[in-house]
Image (cartoon, rainbow, N blue to C red):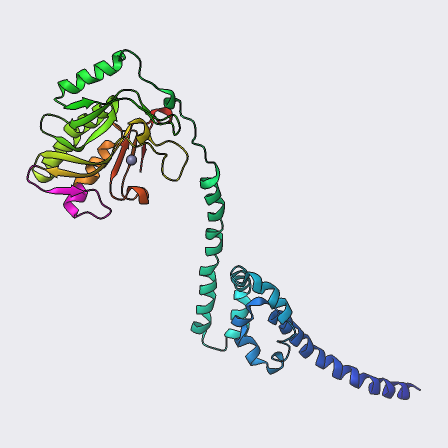
């Protein structure tokens, strides 16, 4: 009985053993089929090549890959990153590691791109969202019958500085909100410095520009070029418009800002505000720009943004806690 049953067992056991031996291979195939289902199967070319049976299963998983085909940009990098270690160690080891190392890098570079591009769409609606200009209390400013004391005093100081200027009629745009109750047009910034073309500004800003030209730009020109400041070329003074890309009124809309495009010296040389000026010009421009932060509350220029690559923007808009905004 015992012998019989043992031999029977052996007879039964043989196919079982054979099956048991076969199962690991099946399992391995199955494992690969699962992997082949991933959308990033392109990068797995090396893995199936080692085990020929893995090739037939390819068509099966395709449906899974087709799904991810919708977002091809986002899906593959993620998968590659996760699988990078296993794919590299298992299948790539026998081959040249250099070749395998290259593909994972490309998807990795791609991955940051979608997130970077994603935040952009929400920003655009924000900018184009509201049509109305944000309210500014200065928009309500209108000239009185008699010029206020501070405006009269400001003009007195300009005259004492040797500044030439003309009175200009009040600026007021009820629709947009621009307003300068007592504008002046600057012709010079001192006894020997002109500003071209004439700059329409609020008197307080005009005085700040004149003092800056005399106290900062002139000595800097003397130090850097051994020449005097002859004139400043302005790109815009009063302009009735919002701040670029926003619905907030620009300081230009209140005659409180000046854009400077270039400086001309007594020796005839002209220094342009530009992203990459000649070395000596750059030294002069940097010094002027740095010194402007303080007398002016906002200082922008090349490097701040695309809108200020060819001029300095100076304005007197009060900043929080009496601070400055200089970029
Ligand atoms: Zn400006």
> Could you tell me if residue 324 is visible in this image?
no
Left or right, 325 with respect to 100, comes to left
As for residue 276 lying within the magenta part, the answer is yes
Q: Is residue 285 left or right of residue 51?
A: left
Residue depicted at x 36% and y 22%: 138
Query: Magenta residues, as a range?
Result: 266-283
Q: Nearer the viewer, residue 182 or 99?
A: 182
User: Whole-percent x and y of residue 111?
Assistant: 48, 58
The C terminus, quarter of image? top left
| Of residues 81 and 270, the one drawn nearer to the viewer in this rendering | 270
Q: Quadrant of the N terminus?
A: bottom right
Residue at image point 56% right, 80% down: 50
Position of residue 139 measured from the top left corner of the image (x, y, whole percent): 37, 24
In-image side of 196 versus 76 (left or right): left
Q: Position of residue 275 (x, y in %)?
A: 24, 47
Name the quadrant containing residue 206.
Answer: top left
Q: Is residue 226 left or right of residue 94?
A: left
Q: Position of residue 124 (x, y in %)?
A: 46, 44
Of 287 and 97, nearer the camera is: 287
Visible residue check, residue 249? yes
Residue at x 9%, y 40% (from the top left corner) = 225
């Amino acid at each position: 009985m015992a012998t019989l049953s043992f031999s029977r067992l052996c007879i039964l056991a043989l196919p079982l053993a054979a099956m048991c031996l076969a199962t690991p291979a099946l399992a391995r195939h199955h494992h690969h089929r699962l992997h082949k289902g991933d959308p990033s199967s392109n990068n797995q070319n090396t893995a199936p090549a080692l085990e020929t049976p893995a090739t037939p299963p390819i068509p099966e998983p395709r449906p899974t890959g087709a799904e991810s085909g919708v977002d091809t940009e986002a899906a593959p990098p993620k998968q590659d990153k996760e699988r990078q270690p296993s794919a590299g160690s298992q299948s790539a080891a026998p081959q040249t590691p250099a070749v395998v190392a290259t593909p994972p890098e490309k998807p990795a570079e791609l991955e940051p791109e979608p997130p970077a591009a994603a935040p952009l769409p929400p920003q655009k609606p924000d900018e184009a969202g509201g049509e109305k200009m944000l309210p500014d209390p200065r928009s309500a400013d209108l000239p009185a019958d008699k010029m206020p004391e501070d405006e009269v005093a400001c003009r007195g100081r300009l005259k004492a500085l040797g500044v030439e200027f003309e009175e200009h009629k009040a600026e007021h745009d009820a629709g947009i909100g621009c307003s300068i109750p007592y504008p002046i047009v600057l012709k010079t910034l001192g006894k020997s410095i002109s500003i071209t073309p004439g700059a329409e500004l609020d008197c307080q800003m005009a005085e700040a520009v004149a003092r800056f030209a005399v106290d900062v730009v002139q000595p800097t020109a003397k130090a850097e070029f051994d020449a005097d400041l002859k004139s400043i070329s302005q790109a815009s003074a009063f302009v009735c418009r919002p701040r670029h890309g926003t619905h907030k009124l620009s300081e230009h809309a209140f005659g409180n800002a000046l854009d400077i495009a270039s400086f001309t010296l007594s020796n005839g040389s002209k220094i342009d505000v530009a992203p990459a000026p000649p070395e000596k010009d750059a030294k002069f421009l940097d010094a002027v720009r740095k010194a402007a932060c303080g007398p002016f509350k906002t200082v922008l220029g090349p490097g701040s943004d695309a809108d200020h690559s060819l001029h300095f923007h100076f304005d007197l808009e009060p900043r929080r806690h009496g601070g400055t905004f200089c970029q």
